[in-house]
Image (spheres, rainbow, N blue to C red):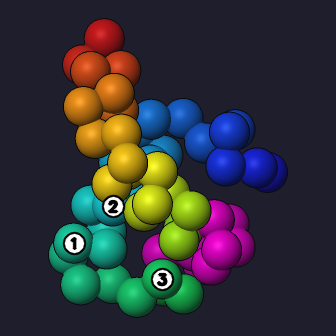
């Protein structure tokens, strides 16, 4: 899986779990993705928060 295959809902789930205090490793294990994907999703969320939130609302 690449960062472009993550849906906005996936990115939001990653960010929500991270904000809840879970480690990147815990989130990656829970979702079946790599720790690098978690880090990329966090960066993607920070760079385009309005874009993801608007997609999620659709």
User: Mark 1 = which residue?
Assistant: 19
The structure residue drawn at horizontal position 54% and vertical position 68%, both measured from the top left corner, is 38
Q: Does the magenta stretch include residue 51?
A: no
What percent of the width, then of the height, locates residue 11? 44, 49
Q: Can residue 56 be seen in this view?
A: no
What are the residue bounds of the magenta stretch? 27-37
How far apart in space, not on screen, are marks 3 and 1 (Cα)?
A: 11 Å
The reply to whether callout 2 and callout 3 are in contact (CB within 8 Å) is: no
In the picture as drawn, the residue positioned furthest to the front comes out as 47
**SS class of the residue under badge 3?**
helix
Badge 3 local density, few (<14 within 10 Å), some, or many (20+)?
many
The reply to whether callout 1 and callout 2 are in contact (CB within 8 Å) is: yes
How far apart in space, not on screen, are marks 2 and 3 (Cα)?
A: 10 Å
Q: Does the magenta stretch include residue 34?
A: yes
Please state which of residues 58 and 39 is positioned toward the viewer in this rendering: 39
User: Mark 2 = which residue?
Assistant: 15
Q: Which mark is residue 24?
A: 3
Badge 1 local density, few (<14 within 10 Å), some, or many (20+)?
few
In the picture as drawn, the residue positioned furthest to the left comes out as 20
What percent of the width, then of the height, locates residue 12? 35, 48
Which numbered disc, 3 or 1, marks the residue that appears first in the sequence?
A: 1
| Residue 5 position (above or below residue 34) | above
What percent of the width, then of the height, locates residue 1? 79, 51
Tell whether 2 sits left or right of 31.
right
Q: Can residue 52 be seen in this view?
A: yes
Tell whether 11 sits left or right of 55.
right
| Residue 10 position (above or below residue 23) | above
User: Which quadrant of the figure contains the C terminus?
Assistant: top left
The structure residue drawn at horizontal position 33% and vertical position 54%, both measured from the top left corner, is 46
């Amino acid at each position: 899986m690449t960062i472009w295959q993550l849906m906005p809902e996936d990115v939001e789930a990653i960010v929500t779990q991270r904000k809840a205090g879970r480690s990147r490793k815990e989130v990656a294990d829970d979702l079946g993705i790599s720790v690098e994907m978690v880090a990329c999703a966090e960066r993607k969320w920070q760079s385009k928060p309005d874009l993801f939130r608007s997609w999620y609302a659709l």
